[in-house]
Image (cartoon, helix red, strand yellow):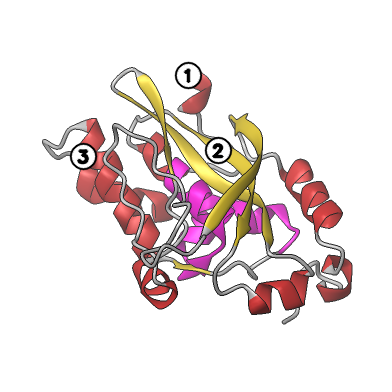
Amino acid sequence: MTENLERTYFFDYEHSAIQELVAEYKNSDLSEIEKARQLYLKVRDGWRYNPYDIVFRKDVLKASYIAKKDHGHCIDKAVLYIAGLRGLGIPAKLHLAKVKNHIAVDRLTEKFGTNELTPHGMVDVYLNDKWVKATPAFNQELCRLTGVEPLEFNGEEDSIFQEFNKDGKEFMEYLDDYGSFDDVPFEFIEANMRENYPNLDRLLNEAGELKL
């Protein structure tokens, strides 16, 4: 369990940017569940979801780097949430999967050649003696645009993407589960993206950034 509380290169929660992120929860009377829940909402809505924010450099996946932006993809937001949780003494680890998005995917399919998102990042949080999943990826504004209810997290039950949207249309389908990781598996993430996105190399510039 201690490895899920450690500061790492990516989960650099001692950095001032992460300390600022969690400052309001550090000396409060809130329970661990309430701290995790409030921080979840802060990350979910404070950073706009952007699936095209792909850069193959380790430094841009550091929580302190992500904290200074206003957007990020699902792994970015998971990394930020994990760093914040660990900074509050709450065990957390990265969980990766492959999902298929069935709503508002025209641009995604055009760019990547598929409507599958991989690896999709979420968070395993240890609360009340059990692990629960949290998915702070889609901010409220995006959810309104796609007709999907924003994902809530109560700290007691898994919070994962809905199978259907509010109109009963198929929304998100889980295809594969890559498991949990105590730290960010950078090489796996890059290899997985290159394997699953046939157009990716064409879209990357010399600095390893997505050019859109």
Q: Earlier in the sequence, mark 1 or mark 2?
A: 1
Furthest residue to the left? Answer: 29
Say the numbered circle drawn on residue 2.
1
Residue at the (18%, 32%) spot, across then down: 31
Mark 1 or 2: the one toward you: 2
Residue 56, magenta (yes or no): yes
Q: Earlier in the sequence, mark 1 or mark 3?
A: 1
Q: Name above or below for residue 122 compared with residue 104.
A: above
Q: Toward which corner of the image does residue 155 lie, by quadrant?
A: top left
Can residue 89 be seen here? The reply is: yes
Q: What are the residue bounds of the magenta stretch? A: 55-82
Q: Earlier in the sequence, mark 2 or mark 3?
A: 3
The residue lying toward the viewer, choosing from 206 and 93, is 93
Alpha carbon distance from label 2 to label 3: 20 Å
Alpha carbon distance from label 1 to label 2: 15 Å
- The residue pinned by badge 2 equals 94
- The residue pinned by badge 3 equals 34
Alpha carbon distance from label 1 to label 3: 21 Å
Residue 68, magenta (yes or no): yes
Q: Are marks 1 and 2 in contact (CB under 8 Å)?
A: no
Figure disc tally: 3
Q: Toward which corner of the image does residue 114 lie, by quadrant?
A: bottom right
Residue type (three-letter) at the residue carrying disc 2: Leu
Q: What crowding class fits label 3: few (fewer than 14 Cα within 10 Å), some (14-19), or many (20 or more)?
A: some
Give the SS element for disc 2: strand
How far across and how far down the image is residue 190, in percent?
Answer: 78, 51
Residue type (three-letter) at the residue carrying disc 3: Glu
Q: Name above or below for residue 84 compared with residue 42.
A: above
Q: What crowding class fits label 1: few (fewer than 14 Cα within 10 Å), some (14-19), or many (20 or more)?
A: few
Q: Name above or below for residue 30 compared with residue 193.
A: above
Give the SS element for disc 1: helix
Q: What crowding class fits label 2: few (fewer than 14 Cα within 10 Å), some (14-19), or many (20 or more)?
A: many
